[in-house]
Image (cartoon, helix red, strand yellow):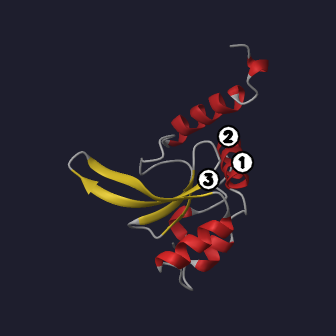
Amino acid sequence: MPKDLHPKLPALAAISDACLERGLSKREGDTNYFGVVATDGSTHRVIACSTGLQYIVQRLYQCVRGDEWRALGYLTSRKGLIGFYERSGRLSEANKPALLGLPEKPEQAWRMITDALVSGAEPPFPAGNTST
């Protein structure tokens, strides 16, 4: 397919290369997925999906095959994400600042993550230091 028919092709190739260089995965269920935006450091995290269309709340499950991150909720805005945390009883003073610090739309977070990844910059969301 010619590059001009699909404007994301060069970006997707650059993302793949950058993930390989940094030892990151493009698979949303992997522990080392490149799109993690917030985590409690153990069993729950928030990612920007691989297309940037939604925030996904995930929980870590330990399976025979190894650790798997599975979705608990799919949200299309920061407001929806915070509402999900409120309804599930997981919103706290500890995780609220991390969630409020996310862009309103997941595509904005995805763009920030991918731009930093491809340019070699530090991740915009230091996922290991935030709390969900």
**Circle 3 SS class:** loop
Give the quadrant of residue 79: bottom right
**Circle 2 SS class:** helix
Instruction: Tell me which residue sits at (27%, 57%) in the image.
Output: 62
Label 1 Cα neighbours within 10 Å, binned few <14 / some 14-19 / many ≥20? some
What number is the disc on residue 54?
3
Is 38 situated left or right of 44 in this image? right
Locate the N terminus by quadrant.
Answer: top right
What number is the disc on residue 111?
1
Give the quadrant of residue 60: bottom left
Q: Distance between the residues labelled 1 and 2?
A: 11 Å
Contact? badges 3 and 2 (CB < 8 Å): no
Q: Distance between the residues labelled 1 and 3?
A: 12 Å
Q: 89 or 30, which is in the foreground?
A: 89
Answer with mark 1 or mark 3, whichever residue precedes in sequence. Answer: 3
Answer with mark 3 or mark 2, whichever residue precedes in sequence. Answer: 3
Where does the image place residue 93, in percent across and percent down from the top left? 57, 86
Is 20 situated left or right of 116 in this image? left
Label 3 Cα neighbours within 10 Å, binned few <14 / some 14-19 / many ≥20? many
What number is the disc on residue 118?
2
Q: What residue type is labelled 3?
A: Gln
Looking at the image, the residue that sits furthest to the right is: 4
Q: What residue type is labelled 2?
A: Val
Answer with mark 1 or mark 2, whichever residue precedes in sequence. Answer: 1
Where does the image place residue 35, in percent across and percent down from the top left? 57, 51
Q: Distance between the residues labelled 3 and 2?
A: 21 Å
